[in-house]
Image (tube, rainbow, N blue to C red):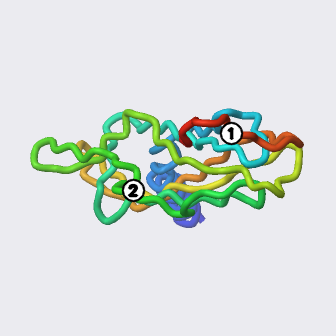
Amino acid sequence: MNYFRKFIFLWVLFFCFALSVFSVDENIVKIEASVSPQRLARGQEGKLVLKLTLQEGISISPQPSFIIEISPGEEISFSKNVYTANDLGIKISKENGEEYLDLKEPLEMLFQVRLEAKQGNHRLEGKIKYFACSKEEKWCLKNSTKFSAAYYTRNTTFKKKKGSNPI
């Protein structure tokens, strides 16, 4: 009977350890997403702004890929729904022979509100797929983090001023 208790104890201990190891990706990348401006008229241009915060000691590798997938919904349209680091002009830095993406600056993607957009509150959703690495702990992990941002569409149509340049 004593052997059985030890066996159960060791399995519980192993399970707890395994959970702590595999939960390492919980807060690797935090994303603060916003839409600017937050109140938009039909036909108006706006931008999605993503501010990324990396966990201490973590870097994002440019390879195999850094991809932002956007599910804009029916109210707005982007020029494309998938963006790469190259599309966004993200700089690649090098330290000790290792390349990583410089994500200090916010990422911005332009969109336009559709003319048939319904008035009201809406949510733009997406996710970022990335390859995170820790030099200190000597591991790399392919992962993704979801984001969302709220915005409001008005019942009016945006009128461009004569002679103004589009965004």
Within 10 Å of disc 1 (Cα), the crowding (few <14, some 14-19, many 20+) is: few
Q: x, y (%) of residue 81? A: 57, 63
Q: Is residue 3 above or below residue 94?
A: below
Say whether disc 2 or disc 1 marks the residue closer to the N-terminus.
Answer: 2
Dot 1: element: loop
Given residues 110 and 162, the one toward you in this image is 162
Marks 2, 1: nearer the viewer: 1
**CB contact under 8 Å: marks 2 and 1:** no
> Where residue 12 sits: x, y (%)?
56, 57
State which quadrant residue 28 falls in.
top left
* Residue occupying image coordinates x 46% and y 59%: 83
Q: Residue furthest front?
A: 162
Query: Along the horizontal axis of the image, is 145 left or right of 67?
Result: right
Residue 130 left/right relative to 62? right
Q: Residue at x 10, y 43 (%)?
A: 96
Mark count: 2
- Residue sitting nearer the eye, 129 or 1: 129
Residue type at numbered disc 1: Lys
Q: For this rendering, which residue is in front, 167 or 159?
A: 159
Residue depicted at 28% across the width and 44% down the height: 91
Question: If the image is split into quadrants, where does the N terminus sit?
Answer: bottom right
Image coordinates of residue 85 in percent, x first then y, are 37, 54
- Rounded to the nearest angstrom, the CA distance separating label 2 from label 1 is 27 Å
Q: SS for tag 2? A: loop
The amino acid on which the numbered mark 2 sits, given as a three-letter code, is Asp
Label for residue 82? none
Question: What is the quadrant of the C terminus in the image?
Answer: top right
Residue lying furthest left: 97
Disc number for residue 160: 1
- The label on residue 87 is 2
Residue 11: image location, x then y, percent:
53, 62
Q: Residues within 10 Å of mark 2 (few under 14, many from 20)?
A: few
